[in-house]
Amino acid sequence: MIQRVISRFIIIALFSIAFAYIESAVVVYLREIFHPNGFNFPLTVFGIENFSAKLFLTEVGREAATLIVILTVSSLFGENRRQRVAYFMTIFALWDIFFYVWLKVLIDWPASLTDWDILFLIPVTWASPVLAPILICITMLLFALTILLLDMRNIHIKPRLFDWIGFAAAVLLTVSLFCHAGRFVAKADYYTRFNWLAFAAAELIAICFFAGCAVRAVLRKNINKSIC
């Protein structure tokens, strides 16, 4: 099982990096079309009124298709629900991290991790400094590796209802921060619109609840072993 999980993880990592290149290539084309003078905040060209509804809907559809691809691959590779969740987080994290790596290689952007970016358009515009999604991806990758490593030792993380409520609160807080910042991408004071303190709180909530789940899983395994 260990060898199988490792080989699948390597394949998924390669897929994620290649998929990230496809995503970054599309963004290179879009920026060349809509931002020929440079992609700089505050955005002077943004919104459905600046380009056709067909192109806008095409971009939204592309984002939805990306999520479906990630869900499909993680479902195919995972042997159980825990592995499927871990592989989804792995693909999403590596895809997003290498999306920025490839953009740096292709067009030397971002200049720094404090540069702002449009993250998502579903159901509204998400925006933030690049550092924020990178930190989330690192957290997701650590969660995924922990789940897979414990699973290889037959230690199963089983979140309780209270844990799911905690995870949901962290996710909703983070998404609300991105969506709030997305409302101001064309404003001169856009850089003041992302609440780093609330973002740190959301990250801490997610990490604490996940750590609690992992510790309980290990303790439960040790107790069962001692009873046997």
Image (cartoon, rainbow, N blue to C red):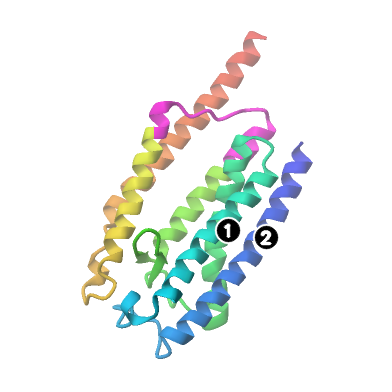
Amino acid under label 2?
Answer: Phe
Q: Quadrant of residue 154?
A: top right
Q: Find out whether residue 156 is within the magenta segment.
A: yes
Q: Which residues are magenta?
A: 146-164
Tag nearer the camera, 1 or 2: 2
The answer, for residue 109, to whether it is visible in the render is yes
Label of residue 128 in the image: none
Classify residue 16 as left or right of residue 111.
right
Picture residue at 37% right of the left edge, 35% below the top: 166
Q: In the shown orientation, is residue 6 left or right of residue 173?
A: right
Q: Label 2: how many residues lie within 10 Å, few (<14), some (14-19) or many (20+)?
A: some
Element on which disc 1 rests: helix
Compared to residue 143, the image places residue 56 above or below, namely: below
Local secondary structure at mark 2? helix
The residue pinned by badge 2 equals 15
User: Which residue: 55% across, 60% down?
Assistant: 66
Are circles 1 and 2 on residues that touch, CB within 8 Å? Answer: no
Q: Which residue is mark 1?
A: 94
User: What is the spatial separation of the Cα atoms under label 1 and label 2, in whole angstroms?
Assistant: 9 Å
Residue extending furthest toward the top: 227
- In the image, residue 172 sits, relative to residue 45, either above or below, namely above
Residue 176, percent from left and from top:
30, 53
Q: Quadrant of residue 36?
A: bottom left
Reading the chain from its start, which is encountered first: label 1 or label 2? Answer: 2
Amino acid beneath label 1: Leu
Q: Answer left or right for 193 relative to 108.
A: left
Q: Is residue 190 above or below residue 67?
A: below
Which quarter of the image is occupied by the C terminus?
A: top right
User: Compared to 53, does 146 lie above or below?
Assistant: above
**What percent of the width, then of the height, locates residue 29?**
52, 82
Report x, y in % for residue 203.
38, 47
